Image: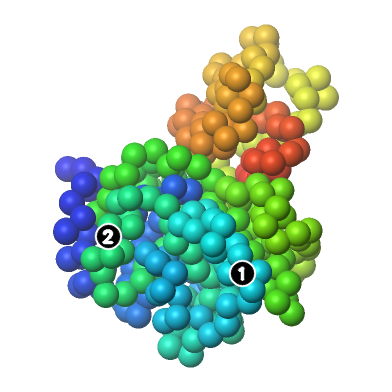
């Protein structure tokens, strides 16, 4: 029997019993539990096989709830919250002492956001606590943008997946932290960096090559299909012997004429980056189920959401 359901009351019941449910958001599906329940938090890490050093995002229904979670709210964080919440930006702020170490991996900061999805906002309003939720995929695997993706991963280990349709944005939230009250981008995400800069001015991007990244979402290899994947600037630069090979292709809008290509996922015929973003992970999931010898992705234009898409393709291809 499917564990996908529209029953918000049932989700409330399960969460009140310290268990976890998968929830829809406008970015990707999350694996959610009560931030104050050690049992729920441990189950999240266990189900995802996620190392405990990788902290979780706290999901709220309103900005008023922020008082319960953070001890400082720098002016530029406020500007970003006003501009983008509910929505796809996560702010990393100084935490209140009441926030469990399991959420923050022992750090002095906590990541928070208000998601923009009617089902999950309704759920959050019916709960007496915020929800900790990482993306609902096993560690390092492709993020889920549909309830069915979550079901494929976790059929036997989850009591319920709340149905919320296909995620509109389809890429994880942009993560912004603060040093001396100045914003720093920890993870490229569903809000283009240019839009963030329109609100707070030029923003530095955290050097992702540090050995202990502030946001482990910036770990080198991540978001990966099981099939071997290659990322190229354009088709012509790729020279490999395709003899007897079955190849899957991901491209922005072009098709390539080559008999080795057994399946092509076009991200946006009309070259719309927002549409491409919303389709990216589903395309990876689809190709990964076809038993291909390899997946080749062609880079998108490196502007706006194209930067985030290329970032994810690079990590998937590592
Ligand atoms: O769109 C999203 O952000 C989705 C949905 C479900 O909200 N969630 C998500 O969670 O992508 P996750 O756990 O897959 O990625 C959260 C990222 C991780 O890279 C984690 O290291 C970073 O947020 N993070 C969490 N707390 C942090 C903190 N205190 N300082 C720095 N990075 C933090
Ligand atoms: Mg994730």
Above-or-below relation of 4 to 264:
below
203 or 50, which is in the foreground?
203
- For marks 2 and 1, give the one nearer the viewer: 1
Quadrant containing the N terminus is top left
82 or 190, which is in the foreground?
82
Which disc is residue 123 wearing?
A: 2
210 or 294, which is in the foreground?
210
> Regarding mark 2 in the picture, which secondary structure is present there?
helix
Residue 183, x across and y down, in percent? 70, 68
Marks 2 and 1 sit apart, C-alpha to C-alpha, by: 25 Å
Q: From the viewer's perspective, tell me whether residue 297 is left or right of residue 112.
A: right
Which disc is residue 14 wearing?
A: none
Q: From the viewer's perspective, tell me whether residue 67 is left or right of residue 177.
A: left
Q: Is any part of residue 139 visible from this angle? A: no
Residue 135, x across and y down, in percent? 46, 56
Above-or-below relation of 299 to 94:
above
Residue that label 1 marks = 77
> Regarding mark 1 in the picture, which secondary structure is present there?
helix
Look at 54% across and 64% down and name the residue there. 81
Q: From the viewer's perspective, tell me whether residue 29 is left or right of residue 295.
A: left
Look at 27% across and 75% down and name the residue there. 128
Q: From the viewer's perspective, tell me whether residue 215 is left or right of residue 278.
A: right
Badge 2: residue crowd in 10 Å (few <14, some 14–19, many ≥20): some
Of the numbered discs 2 and 1, the one sitting upstream in the chain is 1
Looking at the image, the residue that sits furthest to the right is 237
Above-or-below relation of 45 to 264:
below
Residue 212, x across and y down, in percent? 70, 71
Q: How many marks?
A: 2
Image quarter of residue 93: bottom right
Q: Is any part of residue 181 visible from this angle? A: yes
Image quarter of residue 292: top right
């Amino acid at each position: 029997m499917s564990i996908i359901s529209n029953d918000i009351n049932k989700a409330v019941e399960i969460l009140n019993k310290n268990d976890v449910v998968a929830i829809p958001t406008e970015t990707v599906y999350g694996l959610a539990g009560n931030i104050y329940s050690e049992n729920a938090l441990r189950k999240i890490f266990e189900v995802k096989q996620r190392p405990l050093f990788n902290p979780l995002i706290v999901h709220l229904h309103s900005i008023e709830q922020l008082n319960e979670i953070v001890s400082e709210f720098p002016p530029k964080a406020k500007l970003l919250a006003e501009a983008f919440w509910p929505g796809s930006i996560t702010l990393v702020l100084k935490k209140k002492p009441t926030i469990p170490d399991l959420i923050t991996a022992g750090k002095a900061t906590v990541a928070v956001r208000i998601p923009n999805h009617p089902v999950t906002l309704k759920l959050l309003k019916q709960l007496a606590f915020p929800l900790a939720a990482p993306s609902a995929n096993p560690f390092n695997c492709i993020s889920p943008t549909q309830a069915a993706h979550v079901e494929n991963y976790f059929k036997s280990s989850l009591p319920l997946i709340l149905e919320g349709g296909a995620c509109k944005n389809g890429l994880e939230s942009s993560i912004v932290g603060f040093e001396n009250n100045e914003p720093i981008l920890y993870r490229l995400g569903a809000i283009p960096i240019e839009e963030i800069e329109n609100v707070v001015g030029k923003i530095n991007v955290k050097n992702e090559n540090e050995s202990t990244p502030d946001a482990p979402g910036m770990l080198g290899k991540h978001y990966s299909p099981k099939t071997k994947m290659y990322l190229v600037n354009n088709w012509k630069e790729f020279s490999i012997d395709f003899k007897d090979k079955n190849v899957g292709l991901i491209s922005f809008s072009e098709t390539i004429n080559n008999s080795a290509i057994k399946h092509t996922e076009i991200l946006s015929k009309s070259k719309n980056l927002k549409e491409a973003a919303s389709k990216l992970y589903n395309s990876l999931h689809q190709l990964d189920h076809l038993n291909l010898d390899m997946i080749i992705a062609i880079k998108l234009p490196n502007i706006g959401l194209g930067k985030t898409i290329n970032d994810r393709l690079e990590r998937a291809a590592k």
